[in-house]
Amino acid sequence: METLNRIVTSSIGRKLVVALMGLLLCGFLVGHLGGNLFLFVGKDAFNAYAHHLETFPLLVPVELGLAGVALVHILVTLYLQLTSLAARPERYAVTQSKGGRTWGSSTMIYTAAAVLLFIVVHVATLKYGARPSPEDLHGLVMRYFSSWGWVAFYAGCMACLGLHLSHGFWSAFQTFGVDHPKYTPVIKGLGTAFAVAVSLAFASIPVWARIAMGGSQ
Amino acid sequence: MTMRLDAKIPDGPIHEKWDKARFDLKLINPANKRKFEVIVVGTGLAGGSAAAALAELGYNVKVFCIQDSPRRAHSIAAQGGINAAKNYPNDGDSVRRLFYDTIKGGDFRAREANVYRLAQVSNAIIDHCVAQGVPFARDYGGTLDNRSFGGAQVSRTFYARGQTGQQLLLGAYASLMRQVGQGRVKVFPRREMMELVIVDGAARGVVVRDLVTGKIESHAGHAVLLATGGYGNTFFLSTNANSCNVGAAWTAYKKGAAFANPCFTQIHPTCIPVSGEHQSKLTLMSESLRNDGRVWVPRKAGDKRSPDRIPEEDRDYYLERIYPSFGNLVPRDVASRAAKRMIDEGKGVGKTGLAVYLDFADSIQRQGEPVIKEKYGNLFDMYHHLTDENPYRVPMRIYPAVHYAMGGLWVDYNLMTTIPGLFCLGEANFSDHGGNRLGASALMQGLGDGYFIIPYTLGGYLGSQKLAKVDPGHPAFAPAEAGARSRVARLLSIKGKRTPASFHKELGKVMWDKCGMSRNAKGLGEALERIPQIREEFWKNVSVTGSGDLFNQTLERAHRVADYLEFAELLVRDALERKESCGGHFREESQTPDNEAKRDDANFCHVAAWEHAGEGKTPVRHVEPLKFENVHLAQRNYA
Amino acid sequence: MKVTLKVWRQKGPDQPGRFEAYDAEVPSTDMSFLELMDTVNEGLIAKGSDAIAFDHDCREGICGMCSQVIDGQPHGPDQGAATCQLHMRKFKDGDVVTVEPFRAKAFPVIKDLVVDRSALDRVVSCGGFISINTGAAVDGNAVPVPKVDAEAAMDAAACIGCGACVAACPNAAAMLFVGAKVSHLALLPQGGPERARRVLGMRQAMDAEGFGHCTNEAECEAVCPKEIKVSNIARLNREFIKALVCSKE
């Protein structure tokens, strides 16, 4: 109990929670991406995969769990952000980085907002959107990406996700105290590679859908 | 006069004196220690370690420091190392040799018994600091590493890169903060001691000014420990931090504490030269650099070629030439004077001609840059930041600067001043370094005093006294507070035309010119005339802006300069009276044919302790004869 | 050359502050930035005005007393240097230099550029030490310490406690300061017995003082005058996790 108390009441403990949730979400990204890539295999494969997933008996608990993870990640961060504002009540007139901050690290809260917006839109449109037929998620996706506007929105949001991951991935390891002169550069490299790969791979789907398929079947 | 200087040196053979003293000193029952309140002023190595050690024993300690945190005392800037007689390198060191080297390095003007005790406790200091987590340099086998330092032919200096003082101070600070956490020490930062309070002849409290609010506060205790460092800033330009000052010691002097050997000031040979009129302080480059750096000047006066253009045969490695057996590792006073002689002969280098080279080219070639970097990296970086020159490529330019005060409040063997209950530790006292301090000895003395000597001697004092209960409501505090207030008010009321710093600069120039690296009766006489004039103008024409009840650094500065303007006179007077050359005190009238310092043991083998005779009166010079029973009094020879 | 200093002036802790501009002649680029502040102050005092209050002491980059945020960077533009080691050669003729105090809730302004950093002392008093009473130590060579560990401990112990890490951190966190101390003592065998207690105590004090949390942006490392690395923050996190999992306290 004391341990739990120490986690939830301390700045480091809260960051640990954020980092853990972040890494779980990274895991989800990999899984989700793996599924999405069935699109490249073909309509039937993708729809089969979707069917398989949607009839998975534990889907709802997993989804709820996932939502919970995301929610904890967001809420704890927001709380920490508030403490951060309180920790510096008077702001500087001039601030200038001396080289520590990166694009990714200094925009975490903004990229997070973009990704959150994306999730809401994404779930609303592709999970609950009207499909050509109940079993044809593929059709819905293709119809959806016939619009360049949506493609741009998706790609833009994935760029934000990439930026978020470019800092978040390594940052989570740092928060867990995983650091070693030999391995930290590897982790940082992996973080960058992961960020680039995941965001490009996700973004490639709408782009591919729009270009290769002309946005329709 | 009435002052009696009883050094209270225990009887018996020198190696048994401290043991005997510890046995004879009264003890205080552990449960009774918490009934005592001890006031410690200053949180450097001496004050910080004393406060921590006393609190560990159970005393209640109040600690005052001038900076915003005890961790910032100027001990932090000591670079090179700390001596101890561990003999880990198996190169012939012993307690007796450390004792001998320190006595000889001090040019036979320190007390034998004190120095022997210092050498005896030196090993325990290292053990304690290691246990505190001081990250001393180590060898690959995990054992402690040593390096050599000036004035010794053994390697007995323990070091933590070029930040030894910092690491030792942070060790003492950590121990102090542990006691703060346990509630036995209360720290009062940003306080300046204004007055010493004496009740029934014993020191019982201090009046301090809260530098943030301007509030004058009284604090009472059973004893007062001053560990307030040296008075080098009297010279304006020195290696001391800006806040180092003589104020606390000077207040004590005016209340009856004798001031000993103020003329013994150390001019450190390896400092970064002055670059211009704007200069606010001088920066030391650790003496340890002389382990691997070679000091040289061009052989011909007026050779203005850049150092890389001066071939080997046109260089004069004068320390190696004049002192072949110690070479670049001669003691500081010797190295400083040799540099001065070279510069006086017109061989000075750099834009101003007021510098000599300290060259690492040979060592870098022999040991490789990484090794030099590991040993001195932070010092090289510091030099680079300051001068914009890369010392890995071009030789450093160095020049002597005022560094350390060997003189200080007179204390007996128990570190007590001539005022009962007023103790003085570390650089602020006079006892262990004689006329010249050897490198890496200051840290040893500060910590020795604080960790291993005062815990015994203070107990001995408190255990043998019947001290009445005194609190800040005692009538002795009101006049002291009033004195402090009136001083502040007076400084603020002058509203003259000149800044406090301008007076400080003017005084410093007189001191450096007339009472610096070499002194003579004529110059000292001139200084004695000039200083009162500057002082008089100060009290008529200083401008102190801002208010007395707010944070006011101009006021702080003015207050300290006012003290320097009085103290400087005592320093010069002491230099004038000591008509011999000795350690850092070089009287031109007393030198050997080859310009080395010549002591006069027949007339000056003593400590001069000055007693305040009242405002405007000439102070009284008392003498504590020095007896050398364990070392042979000899003219120093480092050749 | 000439520069203009735009300096934050604030009479006292709860007073409003504002910037004031001072034109300053720079006689030599060898002059340090603080020496320039000195000359500005000399001018102010001579005119009968209140001098700019700023903390400084050793002026050789080791005491940690000097602070100031210069053009948005704690300790100014020089790498691995404290404000007192910053020289005017880093500036150009005509530069307008903005000078502000370190800003954090835990570092309230006392006057002008002077802030109260005693929060750092209080954090140290909650565990930043090894509990050893004077006299109780074993021989210095009794416990060998691998050279790499001693060197790494020294790297961390080099912290001068200036608080620039807090000033530069977007969240005003003190993680580098605490991380450096926890690392220094965790890397040495002497620090072993108190590891868990230390990290738990210092962490608690750090949060209680109102410092923010760490977002691993490493701005602290970039401004640290002693170039202390954020790997010390990782070690702090590691020590904290170890204490959470293993501590019996």
Image (cartoon, coloured by chain):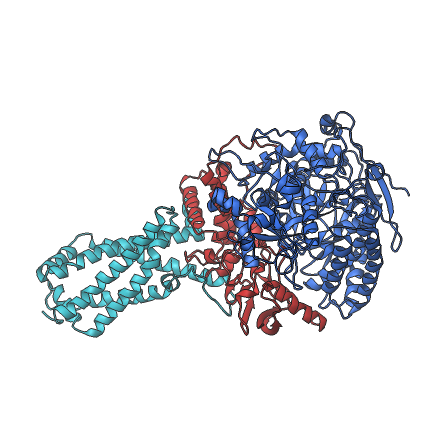
Instruction: Answer yes or no: is residue B184 visible.
Output: no
Q: Position of residue C109 (x, y in %)?
A: 59, 63
Q: Position of residue B536 (x, y in %)?
A: 83, 63
At 46% from the left edge and 45% from the top edge, which residue is drawn? B370
B121 or A119: nearer the eye? B121
Residue lying at the far right in this picture: please name it: B1
Q: Position of residue A216 (x, y in %)?
A: 11, 71
At 45% from the left edge and 51% from the top edge, which residue is drawn? C229
At 25% from the left edge and 55% from the top edge, which residue is drawn? A28
Q: Position of residue B382 (x, y in %)?
A: 55, 53
Q: Colour of chain B?
A: blue
B607 or B316: nearer the eye? B316
Dividing the picture into quadrants, the one containing residue B47 is top right
The image shows residue B549, relative to residue B21, as above or below, that is below
C160 or B85: nearer the eye? B85
Instruction: Answer yes or no: is residue A133 visible.
Output: yes
Left or right of B47, for residue A196:
left
Left or right of A59, for residue B22:
right
Q: Colour of chain A?
A: cyan
Look at the image and tell me in which quarter the N terminus of chain B lies: top right
Left or right of B613, for residue A10:
left
